[in-house]
Amino acid sequence: MKNTGFARWMSGFLCLLIFVGGVFAPALANETIPEDTSAVPQAGEVLEDPATMTEQPDAQAEAAAAEQEDAVKAIATAGVTLKVRREPSSESPGSGSIPEGSQVYILELGDTWSKVDTGRTIGYVQTRLLENIRDKSAPEGGAAPAAAQATETPNIAGDSPDTFVAKFKAYAYQSFVARADMDERSSSRFKVSKYEEVTVGAVHGEWSYIRYQNSYGYVRNAALFKWDRIDPYAGDIPGAPKPVGLAFLNKSANIRSYEDNGAELLKTVNPGSAVIVNTQDDLGRYPLPYWRTTGYVDTDDVSYVMPIVPWDEAQSGDLISAMTTFYAVGVHTLQYQGRNYNIYLGSSYISGLVIQPQETINIYNIMGPYRKSSGYHKAPIMSPSALWGYGGGTCQVNTTLYNTLIQVPILINWRKVHANVGIYYCPVGFDAAVGGGDITMIFTNTLPYAVRVNFFMTDGCMTAALFRV
């Protein structure tokens, strides 16, 4: 009897719940329901049906693109490598850089400082270092203000899945959404997560046509890093150095910051130093890359500039590429003395090396093994398990060589970066670590002639140069 009564009571209670639920269901429908995260598109998934993408663009993507379009007030070209500051001040910490010749998206144009969107971050650059400033509505390759230079309309005839040819590999510097066209306002194609690898089929100015997990679309070059060629003749790697010559200094010279008209002294180098330089400006200064910014030397400091000759025009003995990096001197701890010693030793193993056409070089076989028995000293290293080791400093030697090789059609078969955040003496993604195992660089001379590597060394200044034999 007790069980029967309890059953009847439960039945009545359940009926009451159903009745209450029916009455209050409309009110519950107005509450916020947690989003089903399983429906969020993952990396590489097509966000929309490609067949209907033009007619029915993604509303959220359109809204985001419209917001960015409203924010961008003007477009310009970086006259030199621009150091992006967090605040409009030379004293403000850096927040990345924009390579020379790259397109700059201006959010606020100022007389001294301009607020810009790099594609990775938002910050400030010196307005005077911007060239070809034009209104955002001026079409690429079309009419622009009188002060602006017309840009060539890119040929995108080969940009299709059927004709795609792998030319570069790169990695996502940040998560991004690839677009249907070279326009942030165009509809979205697919998403790529941070640090994922993509294949690049074409580079059109500041945009690349990429493939990711059998999906195809356009992305701004600023969203990619750690580039390397798949086809050695694919063309220039975006952001790679392209100096015009090698300047030999006739006296102790001050390298000053280009972005603040020399107010900041970056480094003093010794007489006889050889440094790469870009085209001389109207004031007679020679801009040059210094770590992740731009410095310069005065024309009075330069005794001679050896021109860099295009690889396909070079004759025997011509310089075809070069790279300079800088390192600390005057640090009197034994460990830093060891690092500087290792830089001289490692570069001496490579300097004079002649590489025949189609010859493949593993840099470990030239500089390694990195041990005391090979003559290396203890020095600071980048390692999760140790603070120092034998051979510290040879990574900078290898990085300097790497940046020299990628200026010409030489194939980098294998390299590893120190970390995704990069290393201070070169732009992010342009370093090449050395060590044990697979931490090395392997390259093949895919030029039609033999080349020779030479290093020019003075305290604190290291330059690698590549000559046609």
Image: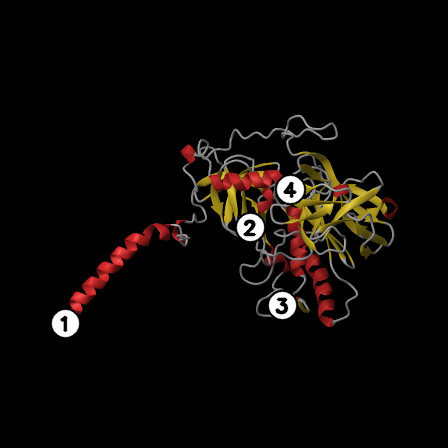
Q: Is residue 163 something that shows in the picture?
A: yes
Amino acid type at mark 1: Asn
**Pointer 2: residues within 10 angstroms few (<14), some, or many (20+)?**
some
- Residue that numbered label 2 is attached to: 174
Name the outermost residue toward the left: 1
Estimate the spatial distance between the alpha carbons at disc 4 and disc 1, rounded to whole Å: 89 Å
Identified at 54% across, 49% down, the residue is 171
Is label 4 or label 2 in front? 2
Closer to us: mark 1 or mark 3? 1
The numbered mark, 2 or 3, whose residue comes first in the sequence reads 2
As measured in the structure, the alpha-carbon distance from the residue carrying label 4 to the one carrying label 2 is: 28 Å
Whether residue 465 is visible to the viewer of this picture, yes or no, is no
| Mark 1 neighbour density, 10 Å: few (under 14) some (14–19) many (20 or more) | few
Residue 34 point in image, percent of width and height: 41, 54
412 and 2: which is toward the camera = 2
Instruction: Name the residue at 82% across, 47% down.
Output: 261
Q: Which mark is residue 408?
A: 4
Residue 181 location, x and y as percent? 53, 34
Residue under label 1? 3
User: Mark 4 near mark 3, Cβ–Cβ under 8 Å?
Assistant: no
Report the mark closest to the observer, 4 or 1. Answer: 1
Q: What is the C-alpha distance between the residues marked 4 and 3? A: 32 Å
Instruction: Measure the alpha-carbon separation of dots 1 and 3.
Output: 84 Å
Disc 3 target residue: 371
Image quadrant assignment for residue 113: top right
The kind of residue on which mark 2 rests is Gln
Quadrant of the rendered image containing residue 342:
bottom right
Q: Which mark is residue 158?
A: none
Residue 106 at x, y = what percent?
A: 67, 41
Q: Foreground residue, 306 or 69? A: 69
